[in-house]
Image: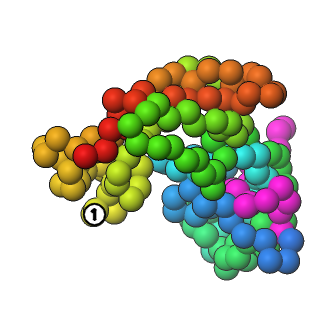
Amino acid sequence: EGVTPIAGLLSVARGGRCGEAGAEEAEGFPGGPAAGLDHFEWRPLRATGATRALCWCATPVAHDSWEDSNSSAALEPHVACSSPSDFRLQVGLLEILGPLPGQRFECRAQGPCNVAPVRGVGLADGHVLLFTRRSSCSVAKDGSGQEEEEESGAGNGDVEDAIALPAEHCGSYFKGCTSVFPSVLMDVP
């Protein structure tokens, strides 16, 4: 006989450790911890590139029995899994490929814009950046996750969104990942 899986919640820590005092959940994982037995899923993932700790908390069924952990009641959050400090068991690391947050770059109007070095996890030549005049890269006014068009600048000749040329030198330690927005995209009216 094999071991019966136990229902649990899987959380992603902001840092590299689970269950520490003051531990926080990582941003970008909608709905908080994912429930499951052996498959855990978040959709859509909006987290930035990083390596984060995967933290697990067992969720016993309502009558505190570990039996019948395949029932839907076993997937309901339990009081014991209500704060990040309850997720003490680190079951692995999650490597999220993508750029690191909080980077700033400066460009001037009327010329090409070289954005470098872009730092991140698993960046590769060919990746592209989006330049937008919107306040966010994705727009969901109704909270549904469906992207909607914004009216600011659309249809009046202004460039609302522009995609950079494919990135180069991502494997170079000295140059770093470089993206270029051609000068035509940087012409500001």
> Which residue is drawn at the image coordinates 41% and 55% (left, top)?
136
- Percent position of residue 51, x then y: 76, 46
Task: Say whether residue 180 is visible.
Answer: yes
Outermost front residue? 110
The quadrant in which residue 9 appears is bottom right
- Percent position of residue 188, x then y: 31, 44
Vertical arrangement, residue 75 with respect to residue 185, above or below: below
> Which residue is drawn at the image coordinates 30% and 50% (left, top)?
146
Vertical arrangement, residue 32 with respect to residue 79, above or below: above
Q: Quadrant of the N terminus?
A: top right
Provide the residue designation for mark 1: 142
Vertical arrangement, residue 77 with respect to residue 105, above or below: below
Kind of residue at badge 1: Asp
Nearer to us in this view, 73 or 33: 33
Nearer to us in this view, 18 or 62: 18
> Which residue is drawn at the image coordinates 20% and 51% (left, top)?
153
> Which residue is drawn at the image coordinates 62% and 21% (left, top)?
168
Report whether 121 appears left or right of 92.
left
Secondary structure predominantly adopted by residues drawn in magenta = loop
Q: Which residues are magenta?
A: 1-19
Task: Say whether residue 7 is visible.
Answer: no
Report whether 182 appears left or right of 90.
left
Coloring applied to the structure: rainbow
- Percent position of residue 110, x then y: 38, 37
Assess disc 1: are there few (<14), some (14-19) or many (≥20) residues with their C-alpha within 10 Å of its C-alpha. Answer: few
The quadrant in which residue 56 appears is bottom right
Q: Is residue 133 magenta?
A: no
Nearer to us in this view, 47 or 53: 47
